Image (spheres, coloured by chain):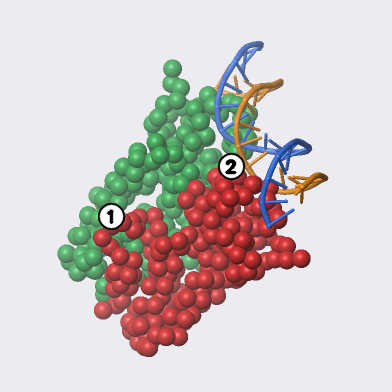
Chain colours: A red, B green, C blue, D orange
Amino acid sequence: MSRHITHTADDGSRRMELVRAAARLFRDQGYERTTVRDLGNAVGLQSGSLFYHFRTKEEMLVAVMALGITATTEQLEDALKAARGTRARLTALFHVHLHSLLGDNQAALEVMLYEWHSLSDATRPGLIVLRDRYEALWQQVLEEAAAEGLVKADTGLLRRSLLGSLHWTVQWYKRDGDLSVSELADRMLALALTA
Amino acid sequence: MSRHITHTADDGSRRMELVRAAARLFRDQGYERTTVRDLGNAVGLQSGSLFYHFRTKEEMLVAVMALGITATTEQLEDALKAARGTRARLTALFHVHLHSLLGDNQAALEVMLYEWHSLSDATRPGLIVLRDRYEALWQQVLEEAAAEGLVKADTGLLRRSLLGSLHWTVQWYKRDGDLSVSELADRMLALALTA
DNA sequence: GTCTATAGGTAGATAGAC
DNA sequence: GTCTATCTACCTATAGAC
C-alpha cells in the first residue's frame, strides 16, 4: 500500500537508508557508473529487491536530489530565523551551505548540483522548483545586505557568483587539511563583503 | 604508423574532427550516456572505425579535456602578453575564460570541468598538470592585482572562488538572452574588485 | 519485503575483408 | 582508413517463489 511513495520524509527507514547509500555512491562514482547491484550491496539487498522500493533507478536519483536541496533549505530557514541582523544572516548563508555540502555524510546536495544532466526532462521541473525556493532565500538576504552597503548592488549576478564559488569547493576542499569548514565559510564571506 | 598518437594538435584533421564532435556530445549528454555509436554517427563513421583513431572511448575523453584546457591556456597567455597594465590583465582573465567556456563551439573546456569523475586514476594526473599550469597564470595576475589593492589579499582562495563562479556560468547562462559574454565578463570582474 | 533467476537490451571493443 | 559482423560483458527491470 505504501509502495512507490514520492515524498522523501523519514518514513519506513528502509527507503531512507537506501537514499542515503545512493547519495554516497552517486557522489563518489557518478550516477551512470553506479549500478543497481552496487546499490543493493550497499544496503545488503539483491539488486532486484530495490525495485520494490523504487520503480526505477532514476527515481532514486530524484529522491537523493530532493533530499539534498530540501534538507539544506530547511536548515537555512531555521538559521535565518535565529539570526539577529543582516550580517548574521549573511553568515548563515555561507555556513549552512558549506556544511551541507562538505560536512560528514552530506553527499545529497553535491549529487543535486552535479548530476543534472542525468535527469530526464520529465523530472527536472520539480527539482527546479525546489532549487528556486532555496535561491530565493539567498536573494532576499543579499538584497537586504546590498541595501545596507555590505555587498555590491548587482545582487542577481552576485547570488549566482557566490553559489558557484561555494558549489565548486567540493572539487578542491580536503576535509583532512587544516582548514575547517567554518573557517572556510568565514573567509569566503569576507571575500564577498565590500569592506 | 601514426596510430594512437597522444598529442592533440591539428594533425590528420580526422582525429581533430572526432575530438570536436566528442566534445559537443560529451557536454550535451554526458560522457557515460554518449555511446561509441553516437560518436560514429556524428562524424559519419561506423562505431568500429573509431577504434582505429583511439584505443578506447576514454582516450577520446582525455583528448577532449586536454584540448579544452590547453587551448584556453594558450589564449590566455597571448591575451596577457598583449595586455598593458594590471587592470587590463585582470580583464583578460575573465574574458578569455568566459569566451572559452560559453562561446560558440566551445564545449571542450566545459567537459574538462564537469567530467572529472569519468576519468580513470591513471589518466587524471596528466590533466591535473595542465590545469595547474592554467591556474598558475591566474594566481600570478591576482597577486599582482592584490599588491596594487585592486582585489583582496586572500589570493589563493580568491582564485578558487572566482574560477568556481566562472565555471558555474555554464549552468545558467543563456546565449540567446540579452547579456553578451563580454558584458558578463565585465560585470563579474566588477564584483571581484575592491573598489 | 526479499529472494532467485532471467528476460531483453545495449554497451565497448575486436577481427578480418576490402 | 573504413566497413560488416560479432563477441563478451554487463546493464535495468521483471516474474514468481517464499
- Which secondary structure lies at badge 1? helix
Of residue B97 and residue B122, the one placed in the foreground of this image is B122
Q: Amino acid at mark 1?
A: Trp
* Picture quadrant of residue A121: bottom right
Residue on which disc 2 sits: B34
Q: Pick whichever, A177 or B46, lies toward us.
A: A177
**Three-letter residue code for mark 2:** Thr
How far apart in space, not on screen, are marks 2 and 1 (Cα)? 33 Å
Residue A110: image x %, image y %?
48, 60
Q: Is residue A81 left or right of residue A50?
A: left
Q: Is residue C9 left or right of residue A83?
A: right
Q: Residues within 10 Å of mark 1 (few under 14, many from 20)?
A: many
Instruction: Give the chain letter at badge 1.
Output: B
Residue A63 figure quarter: bottom right
Q: Helix or strand or loop: what does disc 2 sit on?
A: loop
- Report which residue position mark 1 lands on: B138
Q: Earlier in the sequence, mark 2 or mark 1?
A: 2
Q: Tell whether label 1 touches label 2 (CB within 8 Å).
A: no
